[in-house]
Amino acid sequence: MKITPLIERSILGLMSITNRKKKHAKMFKSLSTNNKINLTIILKPKPKFQYLVFPDLGVGTSIKNAPQRFMERGVERETNQSIEECNKALLEEIN
């Protein structure tokens, strides 16, 4: 589906990079995708990058910080484009 890479790039673009000298999720394909359910996209961090839930939700050691919500904001940012792509694909299928 054309929408998945669009949303994935949007989410990765909102991730902040830490000062630590480790590989960062923003620079790698850190999200796993699942399109097996009809009209559904499931994006979640790959096992190696599970730590992303902590800054995203503001839990664990990130509890003193405000939640970044980059997953939610990334999806919201591309909602209109996703709907347009779905409509386009639907019209192509009908015609």
Image (spheres, grey):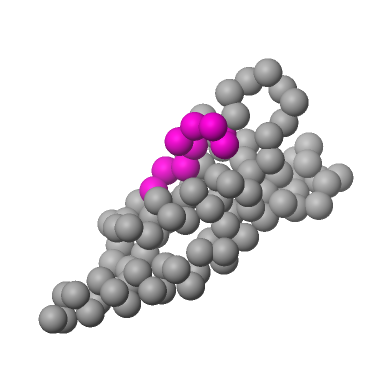
The picture quadrant where one finds residue 93 is bottom left
Q: What stretch is highlighted in magenta?
A: 25-33
Residue 48, how many percent across, how many down? Answer: 51, 30
Give yes or no for residue 32 being in the magenta stretch: yes
In the displayed structure, 21 sits above or below 66; it is above
Q: Which residue appears at 51% of the width and 64% of the height?
A: 78
Q: Which residue appears at 68% of the width and 34% of the height?
A: 17
The number of numbered discs placed on residues in the rendered structure image is 0
Locate the C terminus by quadrant.
Answer: bottom left
Q: Which residue appears at 23% of the width and 79% of the height?
A: 91
Q: List the single residue furthest toward the top.
A: 21
In-image side of 60 versus 86 (left or right): right
The picture quadrant where one finds residue 52 is top right
In-image side of 7 versus 51 (left or right): left
Q: List the single residue furthest toward the left.
A: 95
In-image side of 78 versus 61 (left or right): left
Q: Looking at this view, is 38 or 75 the one in front?
A: 75
Q: Which residue appears at 38% of the width and 74% of the height?
A: 84
Residue 76, how many percent across, how many down? Answer: 57, 66
Locate the N terminus by quadrant.
Answer: bottom left
Q: Can see residue 47?
A: no
Give yes or no for residue 16 being in the magenta stretch: no
Q: Can see residue 51?
A: yes
Q: Looking at this view, is 89 or 39 the one in front?
A: 89
Q: Looking at this view, is 5 or 56 the one in front?
A: 5
